[in-house]
Amino acid sequence: MLFKLKLIHPKLTKRHLIIVYGAIVLHIGFVPYTIAQCIVGHISSFQPGEKIKFKAYYHLLWDTYAADVQFSVNKEVYGDEPAYFFKATGNTVKKFDWIFKVYDDLQACASMQTLNPFWAKRETSEGDYFARENYRFLPSGMKIYSEVQNSSHPSLRDSLNVSGCAFDVLTLVYYCRTLDFSKYKKNDKIPVNIIVDGSLYHIYIRYCKKVVVKNRIDDKKYKCIELSVLCIQGSIFDSGENLKIWVTDDENKIPVKIQADIQVGTIFGYISAMEGLKNHVNALVN
């Protein structure tokens, strides 16, 4: 999740908030580890000009509206190659700013042909804490250069060798939307490589089932595919499949609802607005 739950409970520390970020946008893509180049076919699920917004709630004894999150897709040129420019921003709502003001900005650039990322960056401000992450992906897809800095330590540069597909969080969100979920059956596990805080993690997503989901924002109902995500154990999550995501069962594959069971309470995210979609929302139940 892009916003910081530290303002609600002190155990929710920065190191694992990027995983909670996944609770809001972790419509994560998945590929076998053995594939070095992440080739996709014709991209029919999104286009430049798309914008999607979410409202995030924290539940302990009651629901608390805590943050707004927005995603957008635009077009740019990287070198001589046409590229997608992905951007996600999140901020606490004003009634919480006097307690703990937070702003997050994630950006990524990826090939319009393959969705292989070219670069990605993240900037976070939470009270007196700040963090910056920059990644550069080699065209071969076998190495990632990283530079990570925060208020606890100076800039650290490193390089990571990759034995299979690896994505930054934001590009991974959109890569998943290119996949054909009809190829998977109940309880299929699909592994994924994701780079977070300068480290590479191996997790998986489980295909669960098809279900109708009601959006609490506007009471609309959508035909969805339910996915669950294996979480990294830390100060927020216990180890296990503690993230659930419901994505529209149509060409758009938009996350409609996200639920994260954490050590202190539960996080919910619901889609609140969408525009510039490439396809009609056929998953909407009349």
Image (cartoon, grey):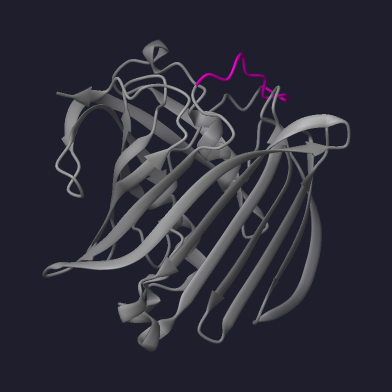
Q: From what the image shows, is residue 67 above or below residue 117?
A: below
Residue 96, picture quadrant: bottom left
Q: Dividing the image into 4 quarters, which one contains the C terminus?
A: top left
At x 44%, y 50%, the residue is: 22
Furthest toward the right, the residue is 80
Farthest left residue? 61
Quadrant of the drawing holding the N terminus: bottom left
> Which span is picked out in magenta?
35-44
Question: Looking at this view, is 87 or 188 the one in front?
Answer: 87
**Residue 130 sits in quarter:** bottom right
Main SS of residues in magenta: loop
Residue 150, relative to residue 106: is it above or below?
below
Magenta stretch contains residue 222: no
Which percent across, then down, holds residue 246?
A: 29, 35
Whole-percent x, y for residue 15 in the image: 52, 68
Residue 77 in the image, given as x and y percentages of width and height: 80, 37
Q: Is residue 6 left or right of residue 66?
A: right
Q: Can residue 105 be seen in this snapshot?
A: yes
Where 280 falls versus 166 (above or below)? above
Which is nearer the eye, 71 or 275?
275
**Measuring 67% from the left and 24% from the top, which residue is drawn there?**
38
Q: Residue at x 14, y 42 (%)?
A: 219
Q: Specify whether 233 is left or right of 152.
A: left
Identity of the residue drawn at 55% across and 87% down? 128
| Image quadrant assignment for residue 228 | top left
